[in-house]
Image: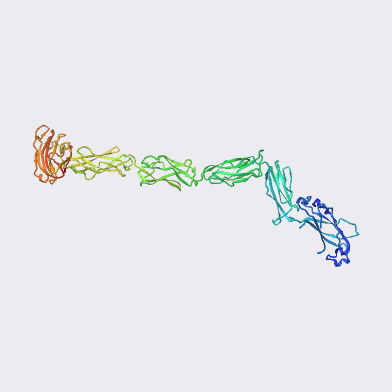
Amino acid sequence: MSDFLPARSRRYASLALLLSVGLSACGDGPTGARQANGTPARIAFTPRFTSGPASGAQAADFGVSFDRVRVVIVRPPSTSVLDTTVSFKPGDADLSLDLRVTTLVANEAFNVTLEYRDASRALFSGTASVIAQPLDAEPTGGTTIDVAYVGPGADAAHLSITPRPIAVFTGTTVHLAAQALNAGGTAESNVPINWSVDDATLATLSSTTGSTTDLQASSRRGNVTVIARTPTGIIDQATILVTPPAATLQSSSGDGQAGVVNAQLSAPVVVRAVDDAGLPVPNTTVTWSAVNGTTASTTSVTDISGLASTTLKLGTTSGTATATASITVGSSTKQVVFSATAAPGPLTSLSFLSQPTNATAGVTFAPSLQVRLLDAFGNTATAANSVTLSLTGGTSGAALGGTVTKAAVDGIATFNDLSIVRQGAGYRIAASVGAVQTTSNAFNIAAAAPAQMEKIAGDGRTAVAATAVDVAPAVRLSDAFGNPVGGVTVQFAPADEGSGSVAGGTVTTGADGVATVGSWTVGNTMGPNTLLASGASLTTSFSATVTGGVPPGIRLVVGALGSASQRTAVAGQDITVPITVDLTSRGGVDFGSVAVTLSWDPAALTFKSLSIAPPWFDSRGAAGNVTTNTSNASIGSIRVGAFTSSATFSSFAFVNVVFTVHRSATITAQIDAAGNAAADRITVIPRPQSITVTP
């Protein structure tokens, strides 16, 4: 008898089936027509539960129970002789069955099937051929019928425990389940499972039967093996470490790596979780985070060695990147920080770290120009490439002065001696490293301080006395590099009292550096006149030759010396216009004689009289004679003449002319030269007399 049979069912270890003669007992069988010729006989059998991997286990250990037995006797090949089911109660004594059949031949063999069942299905079953024995034969134990498990899961080929934690923490519970699969991989349902552990001091089970159970870890550290098995002996087992929870994290490997931005580090970063004794703790969830980078996973679980790892992809910013591993221990967090160095990538672009600004011709740019080498993410590429600069835009033909090729140091090329000498607007500087280029912002170069004044028009002209030269004098101011300087005030002025007068004598140079006087009216003295131009501490002079003027050294003033040139009169009144002639010999020149012609509008003024203030005299005190000619007075002209001067004396004449005023008018005076007109002396141009008539 097999020890696979549960203790409460061992009463079925021997079942004797007695055969006796009696047609009435088997008249309903399929062989009833032949029973009259049959011979009574006995058959006996003993059940034996199949030995195997589950040998020694008890049915109750799987949660299997049965409360009835079925016996089926078949005369080969298929004639049913007997099919009966007998119920029993657990704890009953061994059951004896007296089953009677009729044999047709001596030593007839029957196929006997024995089933142990619950209310719905057979759980164990076996069939054997049993030979009938004569009733008078010595009783024996009979034929052994091997009984095997045929209930749910009898076809199971595989068994799997899930989950399969490598560790559980002391004092905690984990829920386990077992799943049986047949040879085709299909799940078997309602399979009886027996659960057990190899060391109950490390962990216990909430149930030893059923498809699931809970494993309760003790307070001890150690490896416990959980075993699940089916009634047919299919086994799975999982070894689980019972351990205290992790107390801290330790760095294992991967710190201090280096790589290029946006690249994954070659080695993983690895931490170890340990308990208070420093022993590794599996099954601990580690949380990962990163600065200037990303980790391949946000969490990972420590393995049996307490190790957890991830990989770090560096961020796009050069410098330091970190990966942080952390676990929660009670109310605190334990961390390990891994540092890595992210190096810049290869050169992809250039940038002006300091742009050129508006500057002055010939002056070195300040601050110095700096060009930065950049990778694809804007980091400074630290390669020692040489950067070359060139000038674009601005004034045609301009060039960039200084050292235009510099090697980058730590990714920055510094140019500290650059300058441009040509004035211009819209300049740009191009920087290049091979095919990689960039261009600066636009900037302007202004002219330097004026360094030279150049006469460009109006010099060496000839003009009639008291008239403007035909070409106005003009100068161009430029710096030391030939750039025109605008915005500079230039003052044009006669060099002396006899060199005439200017209109628009204060002029500001234009963008072309040019300043042009409004006009230069030469003096009344024949010979050279000089005009000075000055500005920005620079000076030049223009000359003009005067023709048709008075001899040098004569001053003619219409009106008394120092008197106003504007007079007011009432229409119909008479007005006296004084004329002073001053002939002064300077440098030993004899002037000879001169005459003065007065002119006016005869419709505005009527000549009445002319008188010489007596006496006319010279510097020797000698009186002189003055001639007058009023024959043209009616047409607005009179002449007063014969003023003489020697080389050593001066002569003065005072003439008063009386007019009747009809309307506003202007009286002009012209000196007619005689004698030595080429002498170089001062000339004061006559001041016209303006007479304004009031009602």
Query: In the drawing, does residue 136 fall left or right of residue 497?
Result: right
* In-front residue for pair 238/265: 238
The answer to which quarter of the image holds residue 40 is bottom right
Residue projecting furthest to the top: 620
**Image spot of residue 239 (x, y percent):** 70, 46
Q: Quadrant of the C terminus?
A: top left
Up the image or down, 265 lies above or below 614; here it is: below
Residue situated furthest bottom in the rendering: 33
Judge left or right: residue 113 versus residue 484: right
Residue closer to the observer: 135 or 683: 135
Please provide percent x and percent y for residue 559.
Answer: 15, 38
Q: Locate residue 510, reporting x and y percent.
A: 30, 44
The residue located at (70%, 47%) in the rendering is 214
Say if residue 593 shows up in the picture: no
Looking at the picture, how far across and down is residue 497, in whole percent? 20, 37
Q: Is residue 374 visible?
A: yes
